[in-house]
Amino acid sequence: MGESATPLLLLVVPLLGAIVAALSARESWLARASAMAAMLVVLALSLRLFLAYEPAADASRFDFNLPWMPALGINLHFAVDGFNVYLVLLAALLFPAVLGCTWTPLTRPGGCTSC
């Protein structure tokens, strides 16, 4: 997989992390760890994308286009260009920060755990 698969990976990695987190919901530390690991992978991918992005370069560098139903002319198409590269990086920076801020579970005043 080359650079053209990066936009697809930016969608697949959080999906896989969410599936692992949902399947390990009984073990809250494992769910949090899998979510954080997936978001750190997304952060690394988006940093790589941001640093490698050149506006004057070929526009199809970060363009994933796969014929899905060729008879109907339907393609699976993900691309990152222009202003989108900044938004992808912003989202990738915010998700680990939010997960880090909510790492410890909240407790209710009075010690009620069943409320």
Image (cartoon, grey):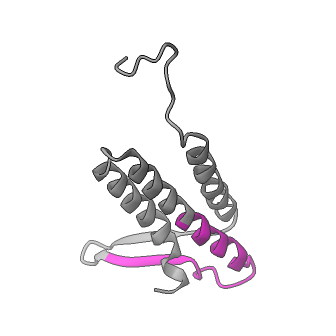
Residue drawn 45% across the image and 70% down it: 8
Magenta highlight on residue 42: yes
Residue drawn 39% across the image and 45% down it: 28
**Image x and y of residue 88, in percent:** 61, 60
Nearer-the-camera pick, 113 or 56 = 113
The number of numbered discs placed on residues in the rendered structure image is 0
14 over 44 or under it: above or below: above
Residue drawn 38% across the image and 70% down it: 76
Left or right side of 62 for 70: left
Nearer-the-camera pick, 75 or 105 = 105
Magenta highlight on residue 54: yes
Q: Quadrant of residue 87?
A: bottom right
Residue drawn 60% across the image and 44% down it: 98
Nearer-the-camera pick, 39 or 77 = 39
**Image x and y of residue 86, in percent:** 69, 60
**Residue at the limit of the structure toward the front, as seen here:** 111
**Image x and y of residue 56, in percent:** 75, 81
Left or right side of 45 for 12: left
- Give the position of the C terminus as an image quadrant: top left
Q: Quadrant of residue 34?
A: bottom left
Span colored in magenta: 41-67
57 over 95 or under it: above or below: below
**Image x and y of residue 37, in percent:** 50, 62
